[in-house]
Image: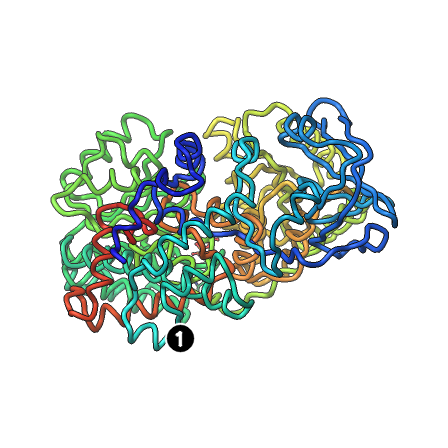
Amino acid sequence: MPINFLTTPIDYLNGVGPARADLLRKELGITNYGDLANFFPNRYVDRTKFHKIGQLVPEAAQVQVIGRLISIGTAGAGKATRLVATLADDSGRMELVWFKGQKFFKDSLKTNEVYVVYGKVSRYGSMYSIAHPDIELLKEFKGRQHTAMTPIYPSTEQLVKRKLTNQYFVRLMRQLYSEIKSAFFETLPDDLMRDQQLMSKNEAMHQIHFPSSNKALQQAMKRLKFEELFFIQMELLLQNRIRKTKIKSYAFETVGDHFHNFYNYNLPFELTGAQKRVVKEIRADMANGSHMNRLLQGDVGSGKTIVAVLTCLLAIDNGFQACIMAPTEILAQQHYAGVSELLAPTGLNVSLLTGSVKTKDRRVIHEELEDGSLNILIGTHALIEDKVKFQNLGVAIVDEQHRFGVAQRAKLWKKNDFPPHVLVMTATPIPRTLAMSLYGDLDISIIDELPPGRKEIQTVHRYDKDRLRVFKFIKDEIAKGRQVYIVYPLIQESETLDYKDLMDGYESIVREFPNPQYQVSIVHGQMKPDDKDYEMQRFVKGETQIMVATTVIEVGVNVPNASVMIIESAERFGLSQLHQLRGRVGRGADQSYCILMTSHKLSAEAKTRLETMVRTTDGFEIAEVDLKLRGPGDIMGTRQSGVMELRIADIVKDNELLAQARNAAIKFLNEDPSIGLDKHQSVRRVMNHLQNKKGLWKYIS
Ligand SMILES: Nc1ncnc2c1ncn2[C@@H]1O[C@H](COP(=O)(O)OP(=O)(O)OP(=O)(O)O)[C@@H](O)[C@H]1O
């Protein structure tokens, strides 16, 4: 069978006229036979068994019921409007509910007819219901053959409206396969298939649509997922190799006096094993003449700042300048304070550039940057303004990368002949395998060890009614000389409602903790930078005991004497944000506490978030849960990558397979870096397609 048979336009297939071809193209991007074959079911259901309505149980999950439709009508109002039908068999009654496509179902379903209904059942009070069920007249259902593994294809409202039902797709697949038979070419080399014990492409492409057994289906899915992940990893690894060999940068070969003197005489503490390892990785990376593009992951408080400082010193030893860019003014100031203090004995010139630096001071900075007398510039977005010109920027350190767009980072590069080395620091841990897939073009260093002597932060969940006890606890801690953060959610800093919440909270705190016994600071996004800074500094210096704030303090603020973090309306924060906030305490030697305050009304997801926070302080574990709750899209921020285009593999659930695919890709490229061996022709071909941006699942054509 010729391979290009798969490129036959979909219109030629029996059962697809021009109108349907158009719909398939528009709704699903299916243009030819190959596309249709690669349109995979998203689940399989047993259509041979039936349940009685009277015997349903809450945990029954997917059920199939035969019943008579006894009523249908609209319920609720406004956004809650829904179509509700009642279905009855001889054992009881249940409800079917539609939020979408109400008109279509209202017009097409008929009372008194008998239907077969399939879907996920849930219970409200004593009534069972299925939302958006698969529904079909019994007489039509009976006219077809049913299996214990009927594929269910993804659908859209348009497809349902135009009667392109699941049955239609099942039929269409049968028609397609009767024509194409074994048309798929094997993309994976024999030895790889043997090593990984993978099913052949042809068999997998059959089994995925017409499973002969559950075992065969699992093998087919494994094969297709592996294939998808393998080629994405190949692409990422190749890009990384190209960057390393093609993009040149400055070779920092010397480890000179600045680094040595600081390391030997001025380090305020012994580095942890993880910090030493990471510094070594960075040193090796910047010394070899290729361009460093490295992601430094370290949980909150793991000690990334000192690594940044040592990286700057390496650049300076080689006659270059360094910059550190932070996402907020407060953070930039804090980095500046921390770095200048560390480097005070060295006599190096460190400056701060943010939006609020006065014109006169700015001018001095610009001059010193250009004549090379400024060694390290720390700042916010102000660093990437066109006016800011370095004499020779050797390394750019970017803190909290997901807040900067990729384009903004690239702007920093443009200031030199060569791009400076780039070190991106993030305190948002990403599970390692995911990081490898998302940031395949970045090398990764991980600080996976906290400085010694830290006590685990104790975290509890309290309700609003416990507030008095919480206040008492705060007073006790303050009496011991500790400081306390109280954080309010601000989803949108400009939202007046949120602002009011914060101010109400502030007032009640001031009432509860009156002057002169207690001093309370407040910091929020609507304050002028100078005022914000003033309040922040009062807290840092220990002049105030309580800091009422919005999430502006989320990242990086370092006040070791603060030992209590109260998070108000904690259910409104995401997991990684909660973890970041909690990371503001536990930075000194004292026992620290985090109290998550909520009302009683919590969604299941909010409960999971709070329980996770109470259970663990491990950032990587929290990141895993976060990923499961939110999916990878949100976590990546602005960064785009092949992961979003995954068709069959799931980056979270198929984590293990992803690691296997990555290892296989590494092994493959070690053996055949240019993909030139005869036995690898099929791989070469897929990679060519990928590089021509044809998309992974188009490679069969
Ligand atoms: N090896 C070490 N031994 C003892 N203390 C250390 C060590 N490394 C860092 N510290 C201290 O730990 C605290 C946290 O370090 P740092 O501020 O660099 O953390 P971070 O990784 O930047 O965390 P975050 O992302 O939360 O800002 C600082 O007070 C720092 O002085």
- In the displayed structure, would residue 521 be above or below residue 555? above
Position of the N terminus, as image quadrant, is: bottom left
- In the displayed structure, would residue 70 be above or below residue 291? above
Of 257 and 77, nearer the camera is 77
- In the displayed structure, would residue 315 be above or below residue 355? below
| Residue with the most extreme left position | 417
- Total labels: the figure holds 1
Of 312 and 176, nearer the camera is 176
The image quadrant where one finds ligand 1 is bottom left
Residue 31: image x %, image y %? 35, 40
Q: Secondary structure at mark 1?
A: loop
Amino acid type, label 1: Gln
Residue 583 visible in this rendered orientation of the protein:
no
Of 191 and 106, nearer the camera is 106
Q: Residues within 10 Å of mark 1 (few under 14, many from 20)?
A: few
Q: Is residue 74 left or right of residue 271?
A: right
Q: Is residue 56 left or right of residue 254?
A: right
Residue drawn at (30%, 44%) of the image: 8
Of 465 and 16, nearer the camera is 16
Residue 686 appears in which quarter of the rendering? bottom left
Task: Specify whether tag 1 is near ligand 1 (CB below 8 Å).
Answer: no
Q: What's the coloring here? A: rainbow
Residue 527: image x %, image y %? 52, 27
Q: Is residue 558 left or right of residue 486?
A: left
Residue 402 visible in this rendered orientation of the protein:
yes
Residue 209: image x %, image y %? 48, 56
Q: Which residue is mark 1?
A: 197
Residue drawn at (21%, 53%) of the image: 688
Residue 438: image x %, image y %? 38, 53
Residue drawn at (58%, 55%) of the image: 150
